[in-house]
Amino acid sequence: MPPRVILIGPPGAGKSSVGKSLARLLQEEFVDTDVVIAARENKSISEIFVDQGEPYFRKVEEEVLLDVLKNHNGVLSLGGGAPLSPSAQSAIKESGSTVIFLDVSLAAAAPRVGFNRDRPLLLGNPRAQWQELMNTRRPIYESLAQHQVVTDKLSPTQAANAIVTLLS
């Protein structure tokens, strides 16, 4: 059975924290693909990027995504880049899951992401890199999602409650 809800969005939107709150509210299991990838590879996401490179990471990410779409029926949080490939987009669309785009502004994402931490795709000028990622990814997020929740001024619990309302 496919996931009931799939959360997508950029770094700092709250996919993991909102996902945990939402899973509690729905009394469902929560899975975060980044956590699954790190466990499978026995390395942090940033270590995978540094040691094996982004193409390797994206390949593993897609394998994990396809697996959890088939074998998880609760709340699923995807890494920001997980829905980028055409095959991932098709699998998400065909899953029958409700897809929620957690949207966030750069101003709200910056303190959450802590642009000083280990974010391999945000090296150099993190704010400019984040904005560029969003410019590329926003159309994909919007095309996949049935609903959009702006998380700028919401706590994870408030965002999860907003999603529960959308689902009912």
Image: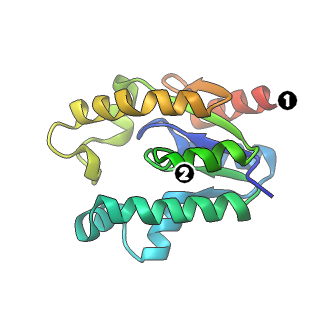
Residue 141 at x, y percent in the picture: 52, 33
Q: Which mark is residue 82?
A: none
Residue 150 at x, y percent in the picture: 54, 23
Horizontal side of residue 85 vs 1, given as left or right = left
Q: Nearer the viewer, residue 141 or 40?
A: 141
Horizontal side of residue 73 vs 20, given as left or right = right
Residue 22 at x, y percent in the picture: 70, 43
Q: Which mark is residue 87?
A: 2
Relative to 136, residue 97 above or below? below
Q: Nearer the viewer, residue 4 or 88?
A: 88
Q: Which mark is residue 168?
A: 1
Relative to 139, residue 83 above or below? below
Query: Mark 2: which secondary structure?
Result: helix
Where's the N terminus, which quadrant? Answer: bottom right
Where's the C terminus, which quadrant? Answer: top right
Q: What distance separates the C-alpha of mark 1 from that of mark 2?
A: 29 Å
Relative to 90, residue 148 above or below? above
Amino acid found under the numbered disc labelled 1 = Ser
Horizontal side of residue 156 vs 13, given as left or right = right
User: First in sequence: mark 1 or mark 2?
Assistant: 2
Question: Which residue is pictured at 26% across the width and 53% down the height?
Answer: 120
Amino acid found under the numbered disc labelled 2 = Ser
Question: Which residue is pictured at 72% across the width and 65% down the height?
Answer: 71
Which corner quadrant of the image does residue 133 belong to? top left
Question: Which residue is pictured at 70% across the width and 27% down the height?
Answer: 162
Q: Quick one: label 2, few (<14), some, or many (20+) residues within 10 Å?
A: few
